Image (spheres, helix red, strand yellow):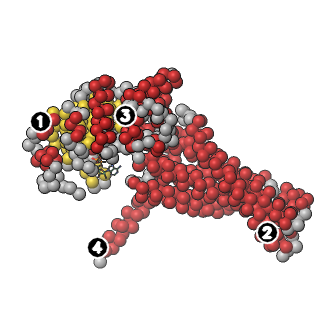
Amino acid sequence: MFLYLYNLISRFGTLVIDYFFAVGAAWLFILNVLYKAVTPPYRFSLIIQQLYVIGAQSVAVVALVGVFTGAVLAVQGEYTLAQFGATAYTGSAIALSLIRELGPVLTALMVNGRAGSAMTAELGIMKITEQVDALRSMAVDPIRYLMVPRIIAGLISVPLLTAIFNVVGIAGGYIVGVENLGLSSGTFMSQMIQAVKDVDIISGFVKSVVFGFTFSWVACYKGWTCGFGAVGVNRATTSAVVTSAVAILVLDYFLTSILTNIFM
Amino acid sequence: MIKIRDLHKRFGEQVVLAGANLDIEDGSVIAIVGPSGTGKSVLLKIITGLMLADFGEVIVGDESMTGAKNSEERRRICRQMGVLFQNAALFDSLTLFENVCFPLDVRKELKETEIKKRSMHYLREVGLRGFENALPGEVSIGMRKRVGIARALVTEPRLILFDEPNTGLDPEVGQEIYELISETHKKFGFTGIVISHEIPEVFQVCSRVAMLYGGQIQAEGTIDEFLASNNQVVKQFVAGNIQGPIQLC
Ligand SMILES: Nc1ncnc2c1ncn2[C@@H]1O[C@H](COP(=O)(O)OP(=O)(O)O)[C@@H](O)[C@H]1O
Ligand SMILES: [Mg+2]
């Protein structure tokens, strides 16, 4: 009986210790990356390359999701607001939902699915095929060479893609609202412009920066700590995508609460 | 001269190196042999400073790799070395030519044109003229290993380490790689460490042999001395017997 309890407690203890070790390691990793991001030598060409892979190549999918999100918001918003006779506010509802909430979240989730998973898989494969060791053997710091450009590019890409998502989404909402549902174009625009405040744009921006940082941190860290073989890469990739997605949604809740409190 | 003294390394419960000792003379090629999973690659990574030992010392020339204070210093010592990794470890996103240029590019010691010239020279040296713009994924593993050798040679290092240079190759291609190692050694006179689990094939490139097993160097000497060794582990390995002290998994 005692032995059983002892085993139970020790197993639980191991789990807790392992957990804190993992969290600690992820923090040390990102502190290392951040330190190396702000100290020379800087590698701008690598950052640009990653901006292309993470940012430019995600524009199409982000725009596609954006336009349909805006369209759905128009249909749904008009339906809900009609019950209060307030369809004039459809434009405001669409814009505020996109800018404050859906733009940053959906963009980050899409980029995570598209670029985050690819990033983890690429880094994981580089690790298990000893390409990371090869870099180090040539006196190249893999953190500087591989991680810093990716995390900086993630940080820059997501806010820019979010801006595209919002613009395209509002356009989608406008087209559906005005052309299909017969809302007045003037009311749509003027109500929207009146409703959207600087703070909404700032909160959306803060969120997108945080999300961009989060997904690229998770993706890089999971690739960096990838286990052996194809199984290792597979696990790392799955875990990176799921962890980032959950982290983005959880952070979104907290950021929304905090930002709303700050600006109210 | 490379000195390995009382080297220890373990991963959790698993002891991989337990007091390995070895001296390697300048300009010679030594084969480090042993069955798979005995820690040959781990030894290579400790020599190159890619992995830290738990205890013991590795001295390369007149510098102590294990005594290096930080990774920066380890990387600096490692610059006198070239490594051919087990599966060549070429960078997937760079062409074969860019892969060979890479170690020179990051050193920033030579001019662009000089780097190109030298890289092209070594790429030809390993017989890959005409494949400069191919990506590693587009060529065979034998060719990738050749490029790996060119990439190791291009900085003209004093020491080159080859991790299982002919593993994963069919016999003829493996033979070609061995011949390439012998030829380049004659020509450039580096100190070579060739890791392998294949005897007697590896004997054609080396003048000395050391066997790693049980975390220690079991025997070291010329090929003849090695073959005549009385060590039971060496005897079993040389004879390729299933019965003996080596536990096969
Ligand atoms: N980074 C690592 N983490 C945990 N175990 C490792 C690591 N690297 C090697 N090992 C273990 O050390 C042992 C020796 O590996 P290795 O040196 O690759 O053998 P080989 O002689 O075939 O090259 C293996 O059992 C391997 O699982
Ligand atoms: Mg090995």
Please tell me whether mark 3 sits on a helix, a strand or a loop: helix
Question: Where is B73 relative to B187, above or below?
Answer: below
**Distance between the alpha carbons at the discs numbered 2 and 4:** 63 Å
Q: Is residue B208 left or right of residue A179?
A: left
**Distance between the alpha carbons at the discs numbered 1 and 2:** 86 Å
Question: Where is A11 relative to A189, above or below?
Answer: below
Q: Which residue is mark 3?
A: B149
Give the amino acid type for the residue marked by disc 4 in the picture. Answer: Leu
Foreground: disc 1 or disc 3 = 3
Quadrant into which the C terminus of chain A falls: bottom right
Q: Which residue is mark 4?
A: A3
**Sooner in the amino-acid sequence: mark 2 or mark 4:** 4
Q: Nearer the viewer, residue A104 or A238?
A: A238
**Subunit that carries the residue with mark 4:** A
Q: Is residue B238 visible?
A: yes
* Mark 4 neighbour density, 10 Å: few (under 14) some (14–19) many (20 or more): few
* Mark 2 neighbour density, 10 Å: few (under 14) some (14–19) many (20 or more): some
Q: Residue at x 16, y 35 (%)?
A: B223
Q: Which residue is mark 1?
A: B225
